[in-house]
Image: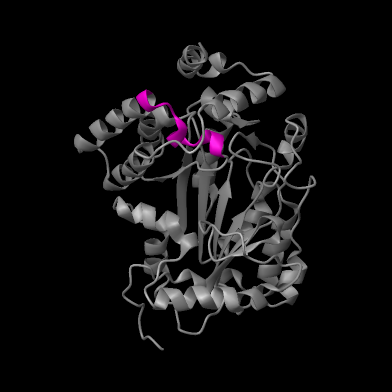
Amino acid sequence: MEYSSLPDSKTFCVLPWIHLVFGFNEQIKPCCKFQASNFPQAQSKSLSEVFDGPIFHNIREKMLAGEKIDGCWKCYEAEKVNQKSMREIANSDFKKIWSETPKIKYLELMLDNVCNLKCRSCSSGYSTSWYQDEVELGRAPTWNRLFTQDISKLSQEGVFNHLTKIKIMGGEPFLSPSHGDLLKSLDHLERLPKMHLEYNTNATMKVSQQVLTYWSKLSAISIDFSLDGYKHKNDFFREGSSWENVISNIHWFIENVRCKQVFFSIHTVVSVYNLNDIIMIDDWLEAEFPGLMLTKGVAVFPSWLDIRNFPEDQKQKALSLYKKIISENKISESRAGFYRLIQQFLEKPQQISFEEFVKMDKKLNEIRKRKLEDYDPELARFLNLYRE
């Protein structure tokens, strides 16, 4: 079956026709939000072989038939509460480059797991700094210290030949030895003027003048900064980070990054640690960085951070707070949409016992020699009462 425009379907998503994620452990998926365990790794097949193979073909056929895909549940959940999902955003952003013939035009690429932070929501799979903590927790580390991407191999396979967008992930991409190799390869192939590069960064460092020069040739660049708390609470959650340095660096990027189109955003992962601070964080960020897009994700992994596991009285307290701020109609519809998503999570039952959060917080504080009461006295008081 052929289409001259995007199919009008509540399950159709353009991404399986134009996009794939090449990430941790070289796993290949249709998008970063897709959750499934049956996707192959690139050691056995090239990216093109997987993209043109039976798994992707089956997903495309089901979407064209209007069937729901199990791995796409995050988008379906977002759409239930009128929050714009990745599926809807992708269909809007990429409808002009979609065709019935699948071709990789947008790649999400994890360069490696080199990172200078060990955020509580992370693991050694995405941060080399987490390795020793996992050992001390008695876990088998997710990855044996360092995972690296072979940029020359991808270039030789022709992966970059038709790309118009690359989302660059880490680790921390600006620390990655492969980052310079990627920019150099794209420049050599004369792809930079046709390319939109998108980054997720912890904003703990600036980039070199050489990187700025490469970026100036781009069609577009998007930089998404990660912040998960306000001031010292952010530094507690994002171990190794310095709030003052991060805020200063975000301003530096805004002032120095130049190309045809430049987009900046700040992303926050909602967890047990910051659930009651999100509104205050957003208020401060809107005042400090007027016009910047603020986005949210709700932590479902690791499961001990999941806000659904909060004791019921705390969930009801938080629900009242978010319902009140939405009903006052003083915030943007985008912000209200994210708050409705948080509400949706809070209205669901516990996934695991809240005791798992209590235990893990205690273990990490002991390993990292941190006292929760020094960073979040209110949460510390609640945990003390909970233990009694």
Going by the image, does 196 lie left or right of 335? right
Residue that lies at the very extreme toward the left in this rendered image: 328
| Highlighted magenta segment, given as a residue range | 303-313
Q: Position of residue 199 (x, y in %)?
A: 56, 53
Image quarter where the N terminus lies is: bottom left
Which secondary structure class fits the magenta region best? Answer: helix
Q: Residue at x 62, y 64 (%)?
A: 38
- Residue 378, image x, y percentages: 45, 16
State the residue in front, 81 or 175.
81
Reply yes or no: does residue 310 show up in magenta: yes
- Furthest residue in direction bottom, as rendered: 1
> In which quarter of the view is residue 275 placed?
top left
Q: Is residue 371 above or below residue 208?
A: above
* Image x and y of residue 285, in percent: 41, 35
Res 26 quadrant in image: bottom right
In the foreground, 96 or 76: 76
- Colouring method of the image: one colour
- Residue 23, placed above or below residue 280: below
Quarter where residue 195 is shown:
bottom right
Residue 211 in percent (x, y) is at 65, 55
The front one of 102 and 200 is 102
Write the residue at 50% across / 71% down: 16
- In the image, what residue occupies the spot 66% across and 36% down? 117
Q: Is residue 98 in view? A: yes
Residue 374 is inside the magenta segment: no
Asked whether residue 162 is in view, the answer is no
